[in-house]
Image (cartoon, helix red, strand yellow):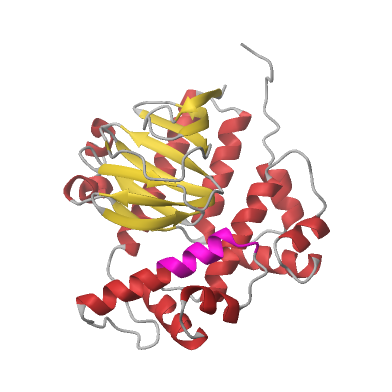
Amino acid sequence: MPVEGVGSDPRRKTTPARWRVLGHPDGMLIYQVRCIVENHGWTDPVAEDRYQVFIGRSGAYQRRLNGRSAVADATSILLSRPGDEMAVAHPYGCGDSYTCLEVAPEVLESRPDAARWFTRDGWEGSTDPSFDLAHRLLVAELRRGLDGFEMAERLHRFLGRLLEHSALAGEGAVDAELGRSVRRRPATLAAHRRLADRAREVLATSDFTLGLAEVAREVGASPHHLSRVFQRVTGSSLTAYRNRLRVRAVLDTLAEPDGRPLGDLASAYGFADQAHLTRVVREQVGHPPARLRRLLTPRERGAGAG
């Protein structure tokens, strides 16, 4: 059964958190963390001593990995390795939640698809809707309860999908408008990354009611310039990225046991109505919200067992 606790993240020992260990079969450990925001500033850097994957579920924060700062949100994914230095900050005040998968070196050494993990710095990227749903369905199954054999097989399959995703995403940025790689001056690239990160901050910490012009004003750019730069840096349009955030927020709420009406969710997350919510969710992950609620609600077996 999952093991829960309140305190520091059980492995990273950084910010206070509520955490739940979901399983630890055959050299792997998977757990969920929800950070408790007490200090908005940076934590002291922590030297990682494990191979870890951090997959965002909700909220937003800032992360500094080996001296490189970036915004992390519900779309973020990070592969770290021993020796990486990480610090986090919560300037937005909204906290965050994520899933962490730790993998022993001997498990990775047995997998040819993990070779790049040993030789590069920590990799940061984004999850697409299909990967995010697979992640959430896996967590729901682990919370319901799996035996060690099935749990290990599920985690190995998930790890394979994750490594394939990181390899494909790391092949290099392509200008979406031109359809080919484009070289730009380092200063220009840095400025574009800052602008895209600022837009991600605004989108991830707003209530999804801001229009494009309002987001552009918040980041100090014209809507046209912001849209072009965001697409170049992230490979995603602002609308698509906003929808990914909204659908992740909906999925997080659908997994809760209180069963809020779908009409209320549509209003809370800025959809035109329940039909619009259903259409966007189905387009993103292939299932309507009502079915996803059934799939994602834990309904844990053996509640109260020691």
Q: Is residue 173 visible to the viewer in this orientation of the structure? A: no
Residue visible at 67% across and 55% down? 250
Image quadrant containing the C terminus: top right
Q: Measured along the vertical axis of the image, is residue 15 above or below residue 4? A: below
Look at the magenta stretch and give its main secondary structure: helix
Q: Measured along the vertical axis of the image, is residue 197 above or below residue 149? A: below
Q: Measured along the vertical axis of the image, is residue 270 above or below residue 184? A: above
Residue 294: name its quadrant: top right
In screen coordinates, is 177 left or right of 104? right
Residue 89 in the magenta stretch? The answer is: no
Residue visible at 43% across and 38% down? 100
In screen coordinates, is 34 left or right of 189? right
Residue 206 in the magenta stretch? The answer is: yes
- Which range of residues does the magenta coloring cover? 197-207
Q: Nearer the viewer, residue 52 or 188?
A: 188
Spot occupied by residue 281 in the image (x, y as percentages of width and height):
67, 63
Residue extending furthest left? 119
Residue extending furthest top? 306
Q: Nearer the viewer, residue 238 or 88?
A: 88
Spot occupied by residue 111 in the image (x, y as percentages of width and height):
26, 42
Residue visible at 56% across and 52% down? 133
